[in-house]
Amino acid sequence: MTSKKIRTIEDMGEFGLIDHLTTSFSLRQDSTHTGVGDDAAVIDHGSYLQVLSTDLLLEGVHFDLVYTPLKHLGYKAVVANLSDVYAMNAAPRQLTVSMGISGKFSVEALEDFYEGVKLACERFNVDMVG
């Protein structure tokens, strides 16, 4: 009996893992211009192309709250996503914010986070729409 080698995510790397998990997916919609694998997806609406991006920042991986003020983290969360849109040679216009938070955060702490989001939106002329 042969044993199957277990691969770790670290062994594959981010882009190797994405390729491995999504290579069997095919694009079915004519409006899908660019799918998985780049910085962002591109959707063809006929008269214009729309670039879609999503990102997730994880505590302990992308930031440490011991050293990162929440206002700075809110700003970083926005620009990390805008950079993917810029990498596709597109101009960001809107963004949505998704968060997973524990009960350890106060409303005031989240206000600080959103102040950073607001500053980045103002700086890069982007509307927060959700």
Image (spheres, rainbow, N blue to C red):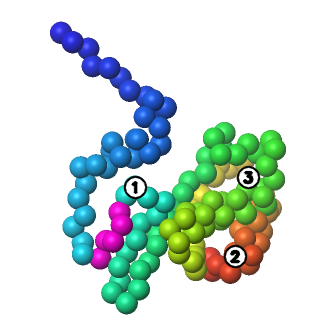
Q: Residue furthest left?
A: 1
Give the Cα distance between marks 1 and 2. 25 Å
Which residue carries the number 3 mark? 105
| Span colored in magenta | 31-35
Q: Does the magenta portion include 94?
A: no
Q: Residues within 10 Å of mark 2 (few under 14, many from 20)?
A: some
Q: Is residue 114 visible?
A: no
Residue 75 to residue 48: above or below: above
Q: Earlier in the sequence, mark 3 or mark 2?
A: 3
Separation of marks 3 and 2 at Cα, in angstroms: 27 Å
User: Label 3 amino acid?
Assistant: Phe
Residue 18: image x %, image y %? Answer: 39, 46
Q: Earlier in the sequence, mark 1 or mark 3?
A: 1
- Looking at the image, do the residues carrying marks 3 and 2 touch, with CB atoms under 8 Å apart? no
> Magenta-highlighted stretch: main secondary structure?
strand
User: Which structural element holds mark 3?
Assistant: loop
Relative horizontal placement of residue 87, taking residue 64 as reference (left or right)? left
Q: In x, y percent, where is residue 3?
A: 26, 14
**In the rendered image, which quarter is residue 34 located in?**
bottom left
Q: Residue furthest front?
A: 89
The kind of residue tagged 1 is Gly
Mark 3 Cα-neighbour bin, 10 Å: few <14, some 14–19, many ≥20 = few
* Residue at the image point whose x is 73% and y is 42% from the top: 64
Any mark on residue 37, and which?
1
Amino acid type at circle 2 is Phe
Q: Residue at x 66, y 39 (%)?
A: 60
Q: Position of residue 124 (x, y in %)?
A: 69, 76
Q: Are marks 1 and 2 in contact (CB under 8 Å)?
A: no
In the image, is residue 33 part of the stretch drawn in magenta? yes
Quadrant including the C terminus: bottom right
- Label 1: element kind: loop
Q: Which residue is mark 2?
A: 124
